Amino acid sequence: MARIHPLACVDPAAQIADDAEIGPFCVIGPDVSIASGCRLIAHVHVAGHTSIGARTVVYPYGSLGGPPQSLSYRGEPTKLVIGADCDLREGVTMSVGTLAGGGVTEVGDHGMFMAHAHVAHDCRVGSHVVFANCATLAGHCQIGDHVFLGGLTAILQNSRIGAHAMLGGLSGVRADVIPFALVYGVTARLAGINVVGMRRRDFSTESIAAARKAYRMLFFGKATMKERIETIAAEFWSDPAVAQMLAFIRAGANRPLCRPGRAADE
């Protein structure tokens, strides 16, 4: 039977795994599902149609499944889905989706969300991400696997951050960021390829070199962007990292690409 502190308020209709732990002063709504091994430390509020994956830990003052901060929301039964083995530190907030955005906010597995990080409505967040303190997503963002967002980073609505990208603290992102990129600046700019991250994730030396060369060709070449993409695709057709970068670029529609250059705060 689940370990529910006598000072917690858990709706009888909520689905709580037998080995979950609900600490004091937690409030759990009727449409909530909490999987095996989860721990809600204390003072956690879980509302809406929210499911929390196995072994995820939520620290005090987390607020999950609250109404989206969107004027279009009218109380529809939209969802928040959080994956397994995540750490949600103090004050983390995540909202349910809106009908306009597909109705689901989704967070993958093995994520670390440091204090006061925020995931807004209809975002799609991958696995193995790190959101440092106060990193914030506006609505409808897409965040790839293994992305690192520095403290106080803010991502504009509908933006996409490619897998393995690393964004420095205080970055203000209003354009799509290609996979494997390094980004910094109040008005964010690319600063190269995240070589350290690629090495940590066992990309080969050849693949890292290909990604760096493709980056230079893409953003510092002389031809049109379309021609540069075609040239890169022809030269690096067998490299998985470059293929991931090009697939990300070709799938874009809502935002321009974040590009290299001096940041506005320099």
Image (cartoon, rainbow, N blue to C red):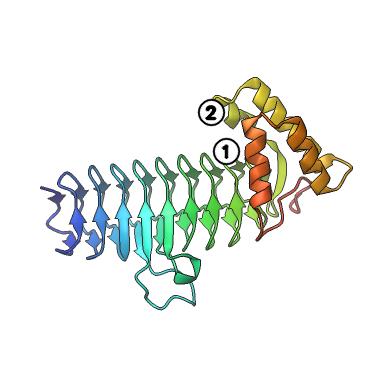
The residue lying at 17 percent from left, 64 percent from top is: 13
* For marks 2 and 1 on the same chain, the one whose residue lies earlier in the sequence: 1
Label 1 residue SS: loop
Label 2 to label 1, Cα distance in Å?
Answer: 9 Å
| Residue with the mark numbered 2 | 201
The residue lying at 52 percent from left, 56 percent from top is: 136
**Which residue is more in the foreground, 201 or 44?**
201
Label 2 residue SS: loop
Q: Residues within 10 Å of mark 2 (few under 14, many from 20)?
A: few
The residue lying at 33 percent from left, 57 percent from top is: 61
**Which residue is more in the foreground, 231 or 11?**
231
Residue 18 at x, y percent in the picture? 14, 47
Residue 262 at x, y percent in the picture? 79, 47
| Residue with the mark numbered 1 | 164
Residue 84 at x, y percent in the picture? 34, 43
Q: In the picture, residue 62 is in which quadrant?
A: bottom left
**Which residue is more in the foreground, 69 or 101?**
101
Q: Amino acid at mark 2?
A: Arg
User: Residue 180, can we see it?
Assistant: no
